[in-house]
Image: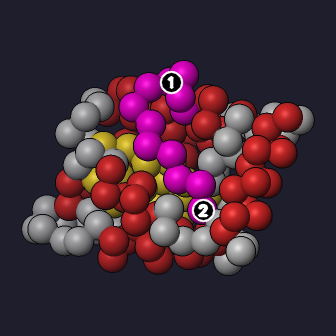
Amino acid sequence: MKVILASDHGGVNLRKEVTDVLNELEVEFEDIGCDCEDSVDYPDYAIPAAERVANGEFDKAILICGTGIGMSISANKVKGIRAALVHDLFTAKVTREHNDSNVLCMGERIIGPGLAREIARTWVSTDFEAGRHKRRVSKIAEYENK
């Protein structure tokens, strides 16, 4: 599995926590920043990361901003992306099992580092169940391809 990791200025600290988790899990990843606390625009990080997942260069992405909302909205504009905004362990698990999410979005101003680490660990480690869920995810792809 290959993961691309990005944040805007509002997610820099939480991104470092997620980096530690990916290293612990021995997941191959690329961190594309940002590495500053000066204001930057979340679409400048979310969209390129999502495009690299959509084109198959990476299997998944983890995107972090202050709330996770801007990253999720931006990433979901890219065809083939199923970005999920997650702030708890249950939805981290279910969005992989039922929705086959390929982008995880979190908000540094919403959750703390310990929870973010567990969300990332759960999301990366959970597989898509397929079955009845595959039909539903396929309907999304069919709509995108109209």
Q: Position of residue 45 (x, y in %)?
A: 37, 71
Residue found at x 79% / y 54%: 138
Answer whether residue 3 is visible to the viewer in this image. no
Which residue lies under the disc numbered 2? 81
Amino acid type of disc 1?
Leu
Amino acid type of disc 2?
Ile
Q: Describe the element under mark 1 as helix, strand or loop.
A: helix
Mark 1 neighbour class, 10 Å CA radius: few under 14, some 14 to 19, many 20 or more: some
Q: Describe the element under mark 2 as helix, strand or loop.
A: loop
Q: Position of residue 24 (x, y in %)?
A: 56, 40
Q: Are marks 1 and 2 in contact (CB under 8 Å)?
A: no
Q: Position of residue 98 (x, y in %)?
A: 71, 35
What range of the chain is rendered magenta?
81-92
| Residue farthest toward the left in the current orientation of the protein | 38
The front one of 93 and 136 is 136
Check the image and report above or below for 89 versus 39. above
Which residue lies under the disc numbered 1? 89
In magenta stretch: residue 93: no
Q: Quadrant of the N terminus?
A: bottom right
Label 1 vs label 2, nearer the camera: 2
User: Number of marks in the image?
Assistant: 2
Residue found at x 23% / y 71%: 41
Residue found at x 61% / y 37%: 95
Side of 69 where 75 appears, left or right: right
| Residue farthest toward the right in the current orientation of the protein | 131
Which of disc 2 and disc 1 is earlier in sequence? 2
Q: Position of residue 77 (x, y in %)?
A: 48, 69
Side of 78 where 80 appears, left or right: right
The front one of 48 and 114 is 48
Side of 66 where 70 appears, left or right: right
Residue found at x 29% / y 31%: 111
Quadrant of residue 134 within the rendered picture: top right
